[in-house]
Structure formats: C-alpha cells, structure tokens
Image (tube, rainbow, N blue to C red):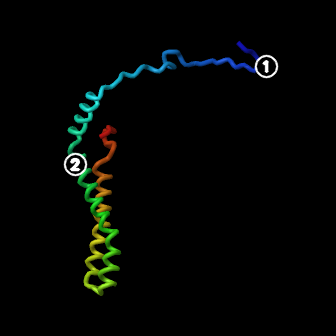
Amino acid sequence: MGGHGTGERVRRSTVHNSVAEPQKKNKVSASAAWREARQLVWAHRRRLTIGLALMLVSRVSQLVLPFTPKWIVDEVLGKGRTDLLVPIALAGAAATHNRADAATAAARNLPLIDPPTGRTG
C-alpha cells in the first residue's frame, strides 16, 4: 500500500461513500418541462408584460439617437433649417431620458429576487 519513501500515496478520505457517489437524476420529459414553463409564465405574466413594455420603450428610444446627427447635418447644416435644431435636440434629450427611465424602472420594479422574501421571481 505504499509507505514512506516508495513514492506511492495512500488515499484517505473522510467523506462517506454515500456522500461521495453522485445521486442519479431523474430524467425530465419535454411535456413536463413545457407544462412547468407555461405555469411559470402564467404566474409571472404581469411582471413579464411590464418588462416587455419597458424593453420596447428602451429599444425605440435607442433608435432616435443615431438619427439626430443625420438630421442635424442634412437638414440644419445642409438646408439651413435652423428652426429644426431645438426640436431635434429635444427629441434626443427625451429619448435619452426615456431610455434611462425605462432601465431604472426595470431594475427597480422587476427584481430577480424579491428583497423581503428572498424568493426568486
């Protein structure tokens, strides 16, 4: 069994065999997984709807910002329409504000873990 000086190591474990051997996992059927997924979606439908709406607001607001320089260059500088400068700036500011508000609302109102209970949800 290898002693001192033989280069062999003796394995000694304090873990019992029942703990060291992994337990067999039950296989899950696809129908059971879909049933559970439907139940989870139905149970959390309000939060999921709010989250989807906030995500859509954020994405639409995100589309405004790339177009503001184009409008400024084409319309204001190119065609001399200085009357559009203020509305373009306000649209860019509103889009930035809406995107920030949507992200903040999503973070505050749709937490991954409920603070009072510690449950996932």
Residue carrying label 1: 5
Quarter of the image where the C terminus is located: top left
Give the side of residue 79 with respect to residue 24, left or right: left
What's the residue type where badge 1 is placed?
Gly
The Cα atoms of the two marked residues, 1 and 2, are separated by 69 Å
Quarter of the image where the N terminus is located: top right
Q: Which residue is rendered at x = 29% and y = 81% of the image?
A: 75
For the residue pair 93 and 74, the one nearer the viewer reads as 74
Q: Is residue 22 above or below residue 48?
A: above
**Pointers 1 and 2 in contact (CB under 8 A)?**
no
For the residue pair 13 and 38, the one nearer the viewer reads as 38
For the residue pair 17 and 78, the one nearer the viewer reads as 78
Give the side of residue 12 with respect to residue 58, left or right: right
Q: Which mark is residue 49?
A: 2
Q: Which residue is rendered at x = 53% and y = 16% of the image?
A: 16
Q: Position of residue 73 (x, y in %)?
A: 35, 79
Disc 1 crowd rating (10 Å Cα; few below 14, some 14-19, many 20+) is few
Q: Secondary structure at mark 1?
A: loop
The residue lying furthest to the bottom in this view is: 80
Give the side of residue 22 with respect to residue 54, left or right: right
Give the side of residue 16 with respect to residue 87, left or right: right
The residue lying furthest to the top in this view is: 1
Q: Which residue is rendered at x = 24% and y = 46% of the image?
A: 48
What's the residue type where badge 2 is placed?
Thr
Q: Position of residue 47 (x, y in %)?
A: 24, 46
Q: Which residue is rendered at x = 75% and y = 21% of the image?
A: 7
Q: Position of residue 37 (x, y in %)?
A: 26, 35
Q: Is residue 112 above or below residue 8?
A: below
First along the sequence among labels 1 and 2? 1
